[in-house]
Amino acid sequence: MKISQKLWFHKAFRMTVIVLLVLGLSFVGLATYTVRQSFPIESGTIQIPGLRAEVKIERDRWGIPHIYATNSHDLFLAQGYVHAQDRFWQMDFWRHIGSGRLAEIFGSSQAETDKYLRTLGWARVAQQELSQLDTEMKANLEAYAEGVNAYLQERQGVSLSLEYGVLQFLNPGYKPEPWQPLHSLT
């Protein structure tokens, strides 16, 4: 092998390694940024529409939120917001299970599962329970739904939850519907 060929080979090898490192670091950076978008905000001040007074949320060393409010409305609204921050994918998934609507998320492959889930009647029972609740409990469920929806208005896709980023590949048209009191019972 001639010296000029060796020199060219070393330069090409070095450039290939550098390009691969830059691409790898860029990918890791993008992946980290994407994953961190869905993390809850744990410090600072967040303006949540609908609050009647100041609410304080402190997370302990395990990340568990402790909510301090001066009235029930604000307590349940903040709880809905925090639940959506921490686990909206789970909430959305379970409301679809409870009402036999998994095909909306995962496509027609879940139609048979939906038929079975609907025969269990969880959505019907939840609707009956909702109509039997007292005024205070209905107001608490409304405030909770208001908090969940306040969070949903701020975020979409992967910033809502990492699972929605993955879901975009399976079902690009899916967008979570607003939360309703019935969904908390379902």
Image: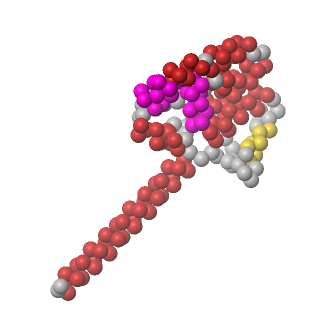
Residue 96 is covered by the magenta coloring: yes
For the C terminus, the image quarter is top right
Closer-to-camera residue (92/157): 92
Residue 164 is covered by the magenta coloring: no
Closer-to-camera residue (74/36): 36
Residue 174 visible, this angle = no
Q: How many marks can you see?
A: 0
- Outermost residue toward the right in this view: 70
Closer-to-camera residue (61/78): 61
Indicate how the structure is coloured in the image: secondary structure
Residue 144 picture location, percent across and down: 69, 28
4 on left or right of 130: left
Q: Quadrant of residue 94?
A: top right
Closer-to-camera residue (185/181): 185
15 on left or right of 137: left
Which segment did they paint magenta? 88-113
- Outermost residue toward the left in this view: 2
Q: Residue at x 76, y 50 (%)?
A: 60
Per the picture, the main secondary structure of the magenta-coloured stretch is helix
Residue 139 picture location, percent across and down: 74, 20
Q: Quadrant of residue 50?
A: top right
170 on left or right of 9: right
Residue 40 picture location, percent across and down: 63, 45
Q: Residue at x 52, y 44 (%)?
A: 162
Residue 89 picture location, percent across and down: 57, 37
Q: Is residue 106 above or below residue 60?
A: above
For the N terminus, the image quarter is bottom left
Residue 46 visible, this angle = yes
Q: Residue at x 39, y 65 (%)?
A: 22
